[in-house]
Structures are given as C-alpha cells and as structure tokens.
Image: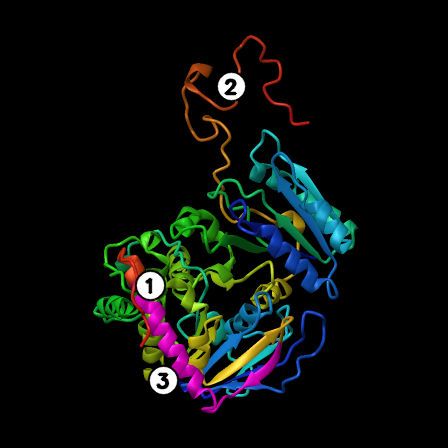
Amino acid sequence: MNPTSIREITILPGRSRGGEPERFRAITIRPGDTISIVGPTGSGKSALINDIEVFARNDTATGRTILVNGDYPPEEFVRDPAHKPVALITQNTQCLADLSVEEFLAMHIRSRKIEDEGIIGQTIDLANEFTGEAIRPGTRMTALSGGQTRSLLVADAVMIAAAPILLLDEVENAGIFKERVIEVLRAGGKAVIFVTHDPLVSLLSARRIVMRDGAVEQIIEPNGREDAALREARRLDGILHRMREEIRAGNLITGSAGA
Amino acid sequence: MRLVIIAGPPSAGKTAVVRQTVRALQDRHRTAYLKIDVVRAFEDEELAAEFGIPARKICSGDLCPDHAGVMVMRDAITWAEEESADLLLIESAGLCLRCSPYTTQGLGIAVLSAVSGTNTPLKMAAMLALADMAVVTRIDLVSQAEKEVFRERIREVNPDLEIVETNALQGTGMRYLLRAIEDCPDITDPDAIVLRGAPPLGVCTICIGKTDIGWQHHFGVIRKLEGADHLYRGD
C-alpha cells in the first residue's frame, strides 16, 4: 500500500473525558474532503487530530482507533515519514530547526529521497502565495514570523511531504491567506481537516465535527444550507482584511470599510 | 530478566518514557528501576509510589555518573532478580552526551527531544551510534517537516537505529518501544555483560593518556606529595 492508494480513513469512537463512549459509529474521510473540527477550548479538538496523526489504536488517552482503507494501517504508514499519508501542521508557529529555509527544505527533500532540486524554489514560491511577508531562501527558520512559518510548513506539506491528508491546527491564528490555502489544498485533491475557531474556515468546510468534553458530540453536514452565512462570512472577512491592511499601513480608517 | 538502559540529555523526557513503559507493562511484567544521578534524584520515589515497583537510586557525587553506573550495574542486576523483577530499567543521569552506557545482553535506548535543536543528534553521536533505539520525545510540538528533518539527522549518525516518535506525557507512539522491550531477550549470563563501547570516562588527565609526571602538569584528581595519604580509596 502506498500513500497515494488511500481510499479512506475511518475514525472509530473512543471515550469522553468522563469515560462515556462517543455516540458516533464511524467518521470516514476521503480525498478531497474538507472537515472542520470546532468546539470550546479544551474540548478535545487537538486530541482528535493527534489521534489521526499517530493512527491511534486504542492506545491514546481518547481510546479512539484509526483505520486506513478499513484496516489497521501497515507499520510503515505510522513509522516511516516517507510513507506516512498524514501531515500535521501544529499550532506552533515557531520552527526550532537551526537552519536556513533552503537548508531545511533541502534536508527534508533528502529524507524523502526526492531528486528534483527545483522543488525547493517551488515550495518557497507556493509559501509566498500564503503570506504577505516574502520568505527568502537564506532566511533562518528560527527568524521566520508565525505567518511565514505556517505558510512554509503548509507549502512543504503540499510539495515535499505530498501527504494526501493534511491536518491543520488553527491555521487562522498565524495571519496567512486562509482562503488561498484552502483553494490550493482542494485543487490538489487533498483531504483537509481544520481545527478551527474561525467562522469562515468552518463554513468553507463541507463537514463540521463538534467537540465537547473530549468527545465528538455532533457531525454536521450543511449541504448548502449555510450558503447565505458563508456569503456573509466572506463579506465580513473581506472587510476585516481591508481594515487590517489599513491599520498595518499606519492609516486612520475614517470611511466605511463595507461593501 | 530483561535489561533496558535508558540514556539521553537532561530534560529529554527519559523519566516520562520510563513512566509510560512501567504503566503500559505493569499487568504483564514486574519492573525494577534504578536511577543514576549526580546530586539529587526523586524519580525512584515517584515511580515506587505511583506503581508500587522496586525502585532505587544512586547519586554519584563527585564521580562521573556513567562511571558510577558501570560500577553498580552488576549489583543492580542481582538486586532486581532478588526483587523477582523480570525487567530492569536503568536510567542514566544524562549529563554528558558522549557517554554511551549501553551493554551487551540488553536493550539500549537513547531519548532525545524533538525541540532540542537540529544538531543535537550530531552532538550525541556516541550515544546514538551504540543504541538500539532512539525515542524522540515532544513530537507533538513540531510539524511533519521538522520531524522528518530531525529524523534525517539521527539517520546521519546511525542509519540502522530504530526511531520511535512519542509524546511521552500522553504516551502516544509508545507501542513500538514497548514491543522492542518485550522482544528483547533475557540476560543469559550477567557475569559476561560488557559495555558496547569504551565510553570517554576518563576522570583525570592521566586517565586520558597525558604522561607527564608531577601534579603541576595535570588537572582533575591531583595530589601533592605532602598530604597524599589517600590517593585512592575504593571503599
């Protein structure tokens, strides 16, 4: 089995923090799916994506099990990063590798046994589509801003890790162009799972998993019923985006930012 | 009885790995635990209180803790056997990254933290080169790309090392470590156990091969003729 032959990933229920069994039978994720995981802070959102990331086998605090194509995944999926079909972009917006961007990507490419050196430049170019502050090949990884780090790690997950399933933990927090990220990931046929507090990211996802007390409480599939809300969220996001740029540029906002 | 030696830099998460191991194996194995440290250690009391296992510590004081560990290891095996343990976990002090306290007839585990810097595996080369397994902790704090780059660095030092990535506080990823421990063969002859490599345990300039005579040329354990009553006391 290689990572490209992933038809589906299945989440089997575990327990809430209070020990109650979760009330869903199974959650199935297929390529191209967009899912957001929402719920109050501490409700177990990150624990859920961590379960997916480590292919839990009733051996994490939640007791969940993750299957690939209906079965336990082969060991190399879990242990060998070059075969791992899942890439997690954590909430951390600081990269600790004491290397330049170029060296970091080169080392990652080497670990993946990719020959094409051009991919370094392509990855940086893609990252620069996600952030307003240009990333240069010679910049130290530790000197990147939160938004730059996130952008680079997302671009890396797409171009180098080439994982069919991406887990993004609060991608909105880092000041990156989230709609552009979602667009690129969708166009690439990735399954994307967002842990998010952001209304726009939630509404852009086809499915919504609602967490409470460490457990999955609800799975919502709006099927177009939220289109009006999505339009509204886009409009508001546009307003906030323009205001943010004005404020960053040192301007006074006196007129209406609406429309 | 199986012998497992756990080494790694300070604060890498060695004790967290031990705790998860003892917890996961407590229904199937009786574990004994020895902590080697320098000045103070509390891990033995904590583990004994939490899991009711036989646990003890030695503090090496002025001596190199890995040297102290080598000295007491044979006794520790006898002690653990007397305690009817079928698994002895020995945790090093984790001071110097060059020492490699692993032995034959046992499993050697190096613990290192994913957030400790890209060059850490290179600095720990001696330890990684002689270990059977590297356990990378705090894996929840780094992204996929960083994990892979860190892995690549470990592989540069020892391409055959088995790597386990874990969030040792939560216990994720431990299943492969537990399997390696359970698959580790029992000690066959405790008196035949030897260190896998000569660790740089030299504690003075003469130990490391400096041949000049006279205390003026040395540092470490030095004595002048006057007052040299106890050059060395083994007991």
Query: Which chain does the residue under circle 3 lie in?
Result: A
Q: Which residue, given by chain and number where applicable, does mark 1 sit on?
A: A244
Who is closer to the viewer here, B43 or B211?
B43
Query: Which chain does the residue under circle 2 lie in?
Result: B
Q: Position of residue A160 (x, y in %)?
A: 32, 71
Q: Is residue B5 visible?
A: yes
Who is closer to the viewer here, B189 or B15?
B15
Query: Which chain does the residue under circle 1 lie in?
Result: A
Q: Nearer the viewer, mark 2 or mark 3?
A: 3
- Mark 2 nearby-residue class (10 Å; few <14, some 14–19, many ≥20): some
Residue at (72%, 72%) from the top-left corner?
A: A19
Q: Position of residue A157 (x, y in %)?
A: 36, 71
The tag earlier along the polypeptide, 1 or 3, is 3
Q: Nearer the viewer, mark 1 or mark 3?
A: 1
Residues tagged by mark 2 and mark 3 found on one chain of the structure: no
Amino acid found under the numbered disc labelled 2: Ile
Residues tagged by mark 1 and mark 3 found on one chain of the structure: yes
Residues tagged by mark 2 and mark 1 found on one chain of the structure: no
Who is closer to the viewer here, B22 or A151?
A151
Helix, strand or loop at label 1? It is helix
Amino acid found under the numbered disc labelled 1: Arg
CB contact under 8 Å: marks 2 and 1: no
CB contact under 8 Å: marks 1 and 3: no
Q: Which residue, given by chain and number where applicable, does mark 3 sit on?
A: A189
Residue range highlighted in magenta: A216-245
Relative to A208, residue B113 above or below:
above
- Coloration of the structure image: rainbow
Relative to A259, residue B201 above or below:
above
Label placed on residue B26? none
